[in-house]
Amino acid sequence: MLHNQNQLVPLKALINNITRKGAGFAGTEAGDTIFISSRLVEQFSLDVGDAITCWCADQYTAEQNDEDRHSARWKAMRVKVDRRLSDAVGEDITPPMQRVAPPVAPANPGKELMSAAVLKEKVMALIQRSRCWTARQLADEVTMMFRDTYVIPDEVTQKVSAMMYSEHLQGNVASCRVMKISTQEKASSVYYARSTEIFDDLLDGYEVDE
């Protein structure tokens, strides 16, 4: 199906999943899902955690019922990368071939860089506690607990944020977004917990002293 360029809707999103077949899915702040073809994923070398702007076609029509609709309302027709996950912490404009790896501290010669799989294991263990967390709190806790065992990646907060967003979309963790007004484009803060009951228990009857 051909789409008129004037009908495309620009949406900012965060990539939260790349499938085995190479297609991608991204989530917007409003909670909508965007499908990204494997061609675009390969063309722009997209990866989980990348922030992008998509010019999207709406795959839903008034004639469709819920069973006929695609899992993602939006389909990306054009993509622009706003920020790579690896570049999120700071701007390093040194050409890649000229970058010099930082020296390893001699006091910890055996430490390895914490891999994405290990980071996810540690974060998902923390999320099982009876409390709620922001992505930064989870990242700080992992850093504090395992800094003597692993080299913690510089972009750990961004990695945890993308991980929690993906786990929430899959229904593995609950999320609570704090908004001052309903028209905010971005939540003031986002909390995660293992279930909505955690939020209910923490908020029920709680009163802040003046």
Image (spheres, rainbow, N blue to C red):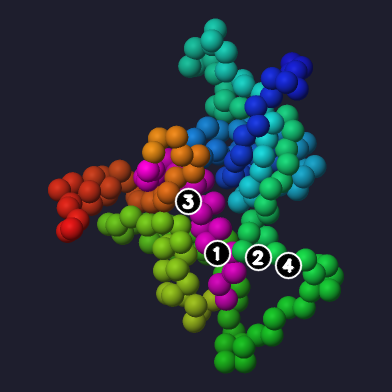
Res 156 label: 1
Q: Which element type, helix, strand or loop, lies under badge 2?
A: loop
- Read off the magenta span: 151-180
Instruction: Name which residue type carries label 3.
Output: Met
Circle 1 residues within 10 Å: few <14, some 14–19, many ≥20: many
Residue 170 horizontal/vertical position (percent): 47, 40
Circle 2 residues within 10 Å: few <14, some 14–19, many ≥20: few
Pointers 4 and 2 in contact (C-beta within 8 Å): yes
Q: Which element type, helix, strand or loop, lies under badge 3?
A: helix
Q: Is residue 188 at all visible to an observer of this figure? A: yes
Label 4 or label 1, whichever lies nearer to me, is 4
Pointers 3 and 1 in contact (C-beta within 8 Å): no
Instruction: Name which residue type carries label 4.
Output: Asp
**Image position of 163 with respect to 125: above or below:** above
Q: CA distance from mark 4 to mark 1?
A: 17 Å
Res 39 label: none
Residue, disc 4: 92
* Residue found at the far left of this picture: 205
Residue drawn where x is 73% and y is 29% of the image: 77
